Amino acid sequence: MRSGSRHAAYWLVVLPAVLMLVLLYFVPLGNVLLTSVTDPKPGLQNYGLLFTSASVQRSLLTTLRIAAITTAVALLLGYGVAYAMRAASTRTQRLMLVLVLLPFWISILVRSFAWIALLGTQGPVNSALVAWGLVDEPVSLVRNETGVLIGMIHVMVPYAVLTLYANMRGIDVGLVAAARSLGASRFQAFRLVFLPLTAPGLIGAGMLVFILSLGFYITPALLGGGKVLMIAEYVAVQINDTLRWGLGTMLAATLMIAVLGTLWALSRVVDVKRLFGT
Amino acid sequence: MNRLEPSGLVAAFAWMVLSFLALPAFAVIPVSFTDTRYLAMPQEHLSLQHWKAFLASPEWLGSIWQSLWIAVVSTVAAVVAGTLCAIGCWRIASDLSDKVRGAMILPMAVPTIVYALGLYRLYVDLDLVGSALGVVLAHSVTGLPYVVLAVSASLANLDPRLEQAARGLGASIGQTLRHVILPNIVPGVLSGAIFAFIHSWDELVVVIFIGGRALFTLPRRMWDGINDNLDPVIAVVATGMILFTLLVLTAELSLRARRPR
Amino acid sequence: MNGTSSEPLVRFIDVRKSYDGKVDAVRGLNLEVANGEFLTLLGPSGSGKTTTLTMLAGFEQPSAGRIFVGAEDITNVAVEKRGIGMVFQNYALFPNMTVGENIGFPLKVRRLPTAEIADKVTRALAMVRLEGLADRRPQQLSGGQQQRVAVARALVFEPRLVLLDEPLGALDRQLREQMQYELKHLHARLGITMIYVTHDQVEAMTMSDRVAVFNAGRLCQVAEPRLLYEQPDSLFVAQFLGESNTLPGTVRQRHGGQCSVALANGAGVIATTVGVGDKVNVAIRPEKVAVGPAAATCVNRYPAKVIEISFLGDQLRVRLAALGREDFIVKFANAPDQVMLAPGNPVEIGWRAEDCRALGE
């Protein structure tokens, strides 16, 4: 069935998308790489700034720190939800799934804006905290790193839940019952049998959330008040304000390579074809 | 015995997290009815002042219109190219076609800021900065992954021998596509179309860079609004966007319910 | 047997279980399990046998009634504190641990010293003839080997009782028969009380000291296999275990342990009395029916006509028209001196009163 002419016809059908991808996607990406080594002068000086520029390193550190905290908290929250989903009846599972997927459908811009409305000094969260006597005066929850973390964790938890849940679905719950019958307490059965089996899910979810967090722009930009410069925003500032294309494209290229590299490592562990259903 | 039994604490924790996920976005709804002139919950009574301001504003309405038709055109382009690509790769089923299909997902994987930078440089050269055409082209490409994923999932349930049977009976590729393949993957195509549409409708980062001085889609106008002054009209826009996407979500769910499984 | 004390080890007292409050999965269960016996819970799916087992294991709570193990009321005791070993249908071996770690697991959660754990694991492996496989992963073993690891794991902590939930279901016939033998052998060696669940009556009869037959949530009868087969107390048991010809009728007279039953077609049968009702089903096993000259001395004698003969290698199975029906089955061994039969032949069939039983509904 592999007649050349038959396949040639189908390759033609694939062509438009490929052309679009190459001309309108790969070319711009290539442009970024090229600019990073040609602007202002040919060479790798821009990349040297990764090691010499204090403000670049500050931004990298901020990015890594926020991505790490976001990942850790999102995994913790996501694990609890995924575990409860795994244990729930089919109907409750569906309800929980709808609640998890709901934020996906609301644009990140709207969600970040909602957090601004909620976390302001005169907003409902602070009003509640003061009214319940938990604090004496409104806490600064937005336009700083706290706000960025809250916003990003909110975006990332659904990704963590879905990845962890997919992994947990494949775990035979009878194993926990077997452990109990052998004398393990509920917590022992969880710690010694269930938790180790979710390790691949935790790794997958952690990597996914981490690499998504690295490249985030909108949420940290809106909730950080210009004081929390993650890489994406830092790049935007370099381009828009100071026109330092060399530095900007270098950072963008570094970000792209880091993300693609981690994804490639992830693909060695996860079967990518399953994504497409085959 | 084939059930997990989480403790009450874990269940309570899970539901708290779920509330944390689902509720905050809806905070914009009461804010849109605020009687204050600044961003806050309604203090004394509900007011429609900001809704009126929104509906009377040519800029906001213009942005809606612009977002709408850009989304429609780019969705059509993404759906056509993406569907054909998914079908082609499914039929060829070689290592190379699998790699091509994998490459189609890249726009989802690579951080948008990187793409926006490169695209800006390209558009400066092509004089497309600030043009709606430029945005349509960009969203067509970034919408591809959604279509390819959705259509591929639909194709996975389709017996490849159907296509072989049709070809064996004398049908050309065009006829096979039209009469045999497409009718069976309509739910996947529609699903992909909906996702691509929502993606373009919400897309912001690319538009910020290539929008120039004059192109203000709805998200971009919101973005500027938030960064300049926190006018509660933005809450109205946000509420509208939530209602709109929930409408589309309901459509997608009812579509999925009717899909034969 | 190896029963040391005469006190039963397990007692179910008036146990009832309902999952949804409407339908009882198990009701009116009163059952005693002797110390050291091999008891099988037998019945079709949904009969309540598995529910009974899970209640004993502790994964479900009875809706009413109590369960005792020894002198202890374990009705509300948590699973992990019951000290009952269990072998699951799909083995439930932990994939993230080696065979040795699987078997050592119950010892580890009981905080035994490492050296002692290693020693017990080695001996458990030897007991199921899997020496040297301690470092393998369960996924690397065959089905039969996995099953033996599951058994070793359930026994290593010396529980007072072992439950087996259809453990041989996934094995092919030859392996299953071999494992039946091994389990029985293990039981004889260790003397540990075993409660086994299966829907396969041959398995039940082969392995058990006693069989408890369940139907629709009720315990129908519990007895040694031979007794159960020869003297079923209910129509269900007579038909579930082996085959029976059943003839509905009404009791006309009783005398001693026997009764005269009038069948629907007017014929009379002398049968062994079981129960007190007058509307009965007379059950007679196909292999207890004599055909031809041998029938002449039977108290129950009837004319019949051969309809169909099936040759099954070691036995012959004959369908006859008799007593107003067309599905009367007779079975006999393919012996050299057997009377020759052909379809359409008229013959006489007969059986003893001791061999047929007047059962209730």
Image: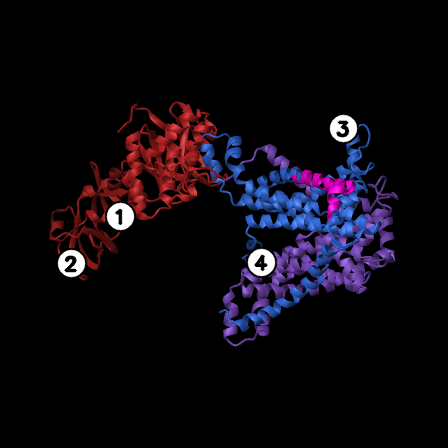
Chain colours: A blue, B purple, C red
Residue at numbered disc 1 = C244
Residue A87 position by quadrant: top right
| Amino acid type, callout 1 | Ser
Drawn side of residue A14 relative to residue A115, left or right: left
* Front residue (pair B9, C249): B9
Check disc 4 and report the residue beneath it: B153
> What separation in Å lies between label 4 and label 2 (alpha carbons)?
64 Å
Residue C354 position, x and y percent, is 19, 41
User: Are the residues under marks 4 and 3 on the same chain?
Assistant: no
Give the labeled residue for mark 3. A134
Assess disc 1: are there few (<14), some (14-19) or many (≥20) residues with their C-alpha within 10 Å of its C-alpha. Answer: many
- CA gap between label 2 and label 1 equals 22 Å
Residues tagged by mark 1 and mark 4 found on one chain of the structure: no
- Nearer the observer: mark 3 or 1; the answer is 3
Work out whether B189 lies above or below C297: below
- Residue toward you, B87 or C297: B87
Name the chain letter of the residue that bears numbered label 1. Answer: C
4 and 2 marks in contact (CB < 8 Å): no
Disc 3 crowd, CA 10 A, few/some/many (<14, 14-19, 20+): few
